[in-house]
Image (cartoon, helix red, strand yellow):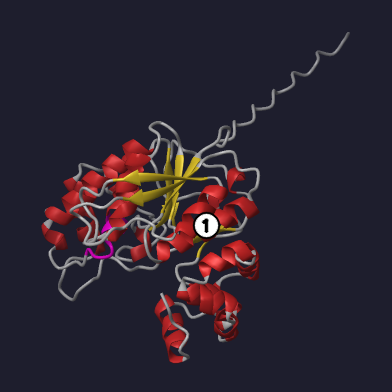
Amino acid sequence: MATAAKKRTPRPKAKKPATAGPFNIVIVGQNGRLQYEALIFAASLRASDPGFQGRLFVAEPQPGPRWERDPRMADAGVRALLQEFGAEIVPFTSRAFGSSYPYGNKIEALAALPEGEPFVFFDTDTLITGPLGAVPFDFDRPAASMRREGSWPVIELYGPGYTETWSALYDRFGLDFDSSLDLSQPDEYWRRYLYFNAGWFFYRCPRVFGQRFLDYATAIRDDPPAALVCQPLDPWLDQVALPLVIHALGGGRPGPDLAGLDGDVSCHWRTLPLFYARESDRAVEVMEAVTAPNKIKKVLKAHEPAKRFIYQGKGARARGLFDRAALPTREQMIRNQLKKNNLWMR
């Protein structure tokens, strides 16, 4: 009697990568240091991910009543090199923020991007150090950078705690507060609450994300809940509104698939003194390689921090002050040491 053939359990179908199609990148380009940071970003993207298939937008605020001075990038050399690297400079109008809160650029710039096309926003002071196009973003589930400290809310004696402060914001916008919590963290500890650095974030549509971000940020600024009466919102407003936006759009904390951001793929360097003090050897290698060509050096030397730290050796001096394997636990401690040694610049 023949034995019955065993049924073979079919293998589950491989999940389709979230990066099946190209996506757009947006940074802000503005007169002053941001224009030089935009050049470094564009140069590092092309060097570290030469096959990137998406578009790079440099969003540029335009003059208007919200700006005390013309915010457009004034260095013609920067503009020419950005275009040489394939960046598209796109204008946007500042209707809610401007000089009073320049961090609002990252909110209002999203209206200048193509509707319905997935995007990743990066703070301009970011270096791309690996293949960004290979990061498996799930654009249906937004997230943002977790490279942050417990900077907000500022808890005062006898004042509202973390739970009261954050739950007041969720209640204001009709959001479910409990589902935002990380229950592995203790009550009234800042890591329990959804809080991001706004150095990068992403979603499937910049217009939807940007409008929600604008609505929440302006509502918090103009009519904050009572629990926020003593809370500082400058410069924290974007980081207060961002977790609410991400939660409202079905997102949350980034998973391990995005570990390359703030890791092997991108580096949010903030300032050149901090960059040299604490970032990886790989990041320093990329920074110095992409800024070495004469055509870039000629332009970047107009930016005093780049001139001194990249080209005149102050970066190496700052790097020599710290052991990257045993850095101070708080950024302010690094800043203080740099200032003590006359190595601090913005």
Q: Which residue is drawn at 65% across and 43% down?
A: 51
- Where is residue 122 drawn, in percent x and y? 45, 53
Q: Is residue 277 visible?
A: no
Quick check: 151 left or right of 155? Answer: right
- Position of residue 175 relative to residue 343, above or below, is above
The residue furthest bottom is 340
- Position of residue 340 relative to residue 272, above or below, is below
- Where is residue 345 drawn, in percent x and y? 43, 79
Quadrant where the N terminus sits is top right
Q: What residue span does the magenta drawing correspond to?
A: 233-240
Q: Can residue 301 be seen in this view?
A: yes
Closer to the camera, 224 or 336? 336
Please tell me in which quadrant of the rendered image residue 8 appears: top right
Closer to the camera, 184 or 212? 212
Q: Which residue is drawn at 61% across and 51% down?
A: 46
Please tell me in which quadrant of the rendered image residue 232 appears: bottom left
SS at circle 1:
helix
- Where is residue 49 drawn, in percent x and y? 63, 49
Quick check: 222 left or right of 36? Answer: left
Total label count?
1
- Position of residue 232 relative to residue 246, above or below, is below
Please tell me in which quadrant of the rendered image residue 110 appears: top left
Closer to the camera, 87 or 115? 87
Quadrant where the C terminus sits is bottom left
Dot 1 amino acid type: Phe
The residue furthest front is 76
- Where is residue 9 drawn, in percent x and y? 70, 23
